[in-house]
Amino acid sequence: MISRADMVARGVSRQSLYRWYRDRAATGHPDKAGRIGVTDYWFEDQWTAWYQAHQREKIGQLTQVDRAGAPDELVDAAEAARIMGYRDRDVIHANRRLGLFPEPDSYGTTAKGRRAPLWRRGTVWAFADARKGLGGAGRTGTAGAPAKPHPYAGDPRLATVLERLRSGLEPASRELAAEWGVTQRTAERIIKAARQQLLAD
């Protein structure tokens, strides 16, 4: 048997647990096995199977990754964006400025003589795989384009805020900004993204 406290210990937020059960007609969440005192319990094998299927469904909502080519081959931002299923190279550059995409493995030169960042295909694939641990519902790019991942997917700062929220602590944007060496506005965005992910889980 498993209780909500046991589920929380596995990294699931209480808000998500209550919402999943409340909306079980839509989510497919298992019914309770019973109650002891004031504590509700579920059959562990049923709940674990359901939760794993739920996670697989969420992962399936991420952009599809093109794994063709050699892992050590260097690619530019445009090709990295295509591999990830992003709209264009601007998404790569924007995410990199926010610290949400790996630093280049090397640099090349554009036709105009400018320095151009390059990544190994394997680096791009590894980043895509890392999104699956913290990926959210995703955002939509241009019409018909694949959904983009959560803007802070894979960001350790998001994981820090999620951990604090799940433990009942209220993160302070000013303190986090000082800790991370970013603006308070950036810290506020990460906190907001963490709250949105908790609601989406």
Image (spheres, grey):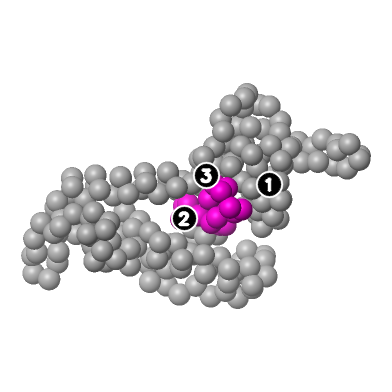
Which quadrant of the figure has residue 105?
top right
Rendering coords of residue 52 (x, y %): 30, 45
In three-dimensional space, the C-alpha distance between marks 2 and 1, rounded to whole angstroms, equals 20 Å
Q: Residues within 10 Å of mark 2 (few under 14, many from 20)?
A: many
Upstream in the sequence, badge 2 or badge 1?
1
**Of residues 103 and 89, the one drawn nearer to the viewer in this rendering:** 89
Rendering coords of residue 3 (x, y %): 19, 59
* Residue 155 in view in this figure: no
Task: Identify the residue at horizontal 37%, vertical 46% (top origin).
Answer: 57
Task: Identify the residue at horizontal 63%, vertical 68% (top origin).
Answer: 186
* Tags 3 and 2 touching, CB below 8 Å: no
Classify mark 2: helix, strand or loop: loop
**Of residues 136 and 144, the one drawn nearer to the viewer in this rendering:** 144
Upstream in the sequence, badge 1 or badge 3?
3
Height in image: 77 above or below 183?
Answer: above
Task: Identify the residue at horizontal 53%, vertical 75% (top origin).
Answer: 172
Rendering coords of residue 89 (x, y %): 71, 46
Q: Residues within 10 Å of mark 3 (few under 14, many from 20)?
A: some
In three-dimensional space, the C-alpha distance between marks 3 and 2, rounded to whole angstroms, equals 11 Å
Would you name the residue on which mark 1 appears? 88
Rendering coords of residue 61 (x, y %): 45, 47
**Of residues 63 and 181, the one drawn nearer to the viewer in this rendering:** 63
Height in image: 4 above or below 153?
Answer: below
**Of residues 63 and 104, the one drawn nearer to the viewer in this rendering:** 63
The magenta span reads 134-153
Classify mark 1: helix, strand or loop: loop
Q: As shown in the figure, which amino acid type bears the numbered disc 3?
A: Thr
Relative to residue 122, is residue 56 drawn left or right? left
Could you tell me what secondary structure mostly forms the magenta stretch? Answer: loop
Would you name the residue on which mark 2 appears? 136
Magenta region includes residue 21 = no
Upstream in the sequence, badge 3 or badge 2?
3
